[in-house]
Image (cartoon, rainbow, N blue to C red):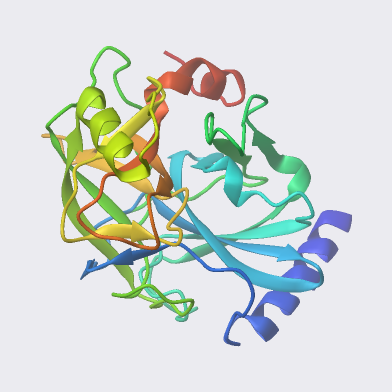
């Protein structure tokens, strides 16, 4: 009963603030993406964070089981109190959208990787344990975890998230996506070195995207890089971590390689195998 009362209070707070323009820190967005449609990315989630007595649009995330969502560690603020996880959504402002679910999660349900380093930008991964099971249907499905023996280099993946078509603090309410190739790590290191003018050592826990006319920007952080399988399901390869420069296109983007963290994920979830 106490949990239900707590959820009602926060849901009331959310409904009051959700349609207000969210000021504060920039939100990662997808530049030059196409609009998604219902059921296209059933594993996609979005996080609103409650901190400092306000709700903030924060990051993307990915459903990997009925009780677990992955996102980036840098999406989890130290002073966060709670989160609203949007599931099965395309239009974040449409609370009556078919298939859309919203789950309230306390900060205590979130596990940030213990070796997350915000200065070196490594181990940028966090797991959100859901207090209730997500109802799977045609709008909501988990992404499969990747094969740890497969690098997926030069394969084509899909990046998705909520955003506008330019670098700004105001994002579209509609889910966007673009198709992009996976950049081999040695090429990623070379390009990052040229862009930053410093030696770049790219860890195996990174997965880089080839430069293209589209880009994740100012943070669709925590959002997925996935590939479509022949059976119609999708496999999660990476979580958006960082880009070089302010929402620049034609530069490599860096994601957290999910296959590097399979043991950690399975230790904190009911997922086996």
Say whether residue 31 is visible: yes
Q: Quadrant of residue 229?
A: top left
Callout count: 0
Residue in the foreground of this view, choosing between 243 and 261: 243
Residue in the foreground of this view, choosing between 45 and 160: 160
Q: Is residue 268 left or right of residue 141?
A: right
Q: Is residue 12 left or right of residue 130?
A: right
Where in the figure is residue 12, as x and y percent of width and height? Answer: 73, 78
Where in the figure is residue 186, as x and y percent of width and height? Answer: 23, 23
In the picture as drawn, the residue positioned furthest to the right comes out as 2
Residue at 79% of width from left, 54% of height from top? 79
Where in the figure is residue 237, as x and y percent of width and height? Answer: 31, 33
Residue in the foreground of this view, choosing between 148 and 69: 148
Say whether residue 235 is visible: no
- Relative to 179, residue 261 above or below: above
- Relative to 186, residue 195 above or below: below
Q: Is residue 271 left or right of residue 74?
A: left
- Relative to 241, residue 164 above or below: below
Where in the figure is residue 200, as x and y percent of width and height? Answer: 38, 28
- Relative to 226, residue 201 above or below: above
Quadrant placement of the N terminus: bottom right
Quadrant placement of the C terminus: top left
Residue at 59% of width from left, 41% of height from top? 73
Q: Quadrant of residue 267?
A: top right
Residue at 60% of width from left, 37% of height from top? 119
Residue at 55% of width from left, 32% of height from top? 120
């Amino acid at each position: 009963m106490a949990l239900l009362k707590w959820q009602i209070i926060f849901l009331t707070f959310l409904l009051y603030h959700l349609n207000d323009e969210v000021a504060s820190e920039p939100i990662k967005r997808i530049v030059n993406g196409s609009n998604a449609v219902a059921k296209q990315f059933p594993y996609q989630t979005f996080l609103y964070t409650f901190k400092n007595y306000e709700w903030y649009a924060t990051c993307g995330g990915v459903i990997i089981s009925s009780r677990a969502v992955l996102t980036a560690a840098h999406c989890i603020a130290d002073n966060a109190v709670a989160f609203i996880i949007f599931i099965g959504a395309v239009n974040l402002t449409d609370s009556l959208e078919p298939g859309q679910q919203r789950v309230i999660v306390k900060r205590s349900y979130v596990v940030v990787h213990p070796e997350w380093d915000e200065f070196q930008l490594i181990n940028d991964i966090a797991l959100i344990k859901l207090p209730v099971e997500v109802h799977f249907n045609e709008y909501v499905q988990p992404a499969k975890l990747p094969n740890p023996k497969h690098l997926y280099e030069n394969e084509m993946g899909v990046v998705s998230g909520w955003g506008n078509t330019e670098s700004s603090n105001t994002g579209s309410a509609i889910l966007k996506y673009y198709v992009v190739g996976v950049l081999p790590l040695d090429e990623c290191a070379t390009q990052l070195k040229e862009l930053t003018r410093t030696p770049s050592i790219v860890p195996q826990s990174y997965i880089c995207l080839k430069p293209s006319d589209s880009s994740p920007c100012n943070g669709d952080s925590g959002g997925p890089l996935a590939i479509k399988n022949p059976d119609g399901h999708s496999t999660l390869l990476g979580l958006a971590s960082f880009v070089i420069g302010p929402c620049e296109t034609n530069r490599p983007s860096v994601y957290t390689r999910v296959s590097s963290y399979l043991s950690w994920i399975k230790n904190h979830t009911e997922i086996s195998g």
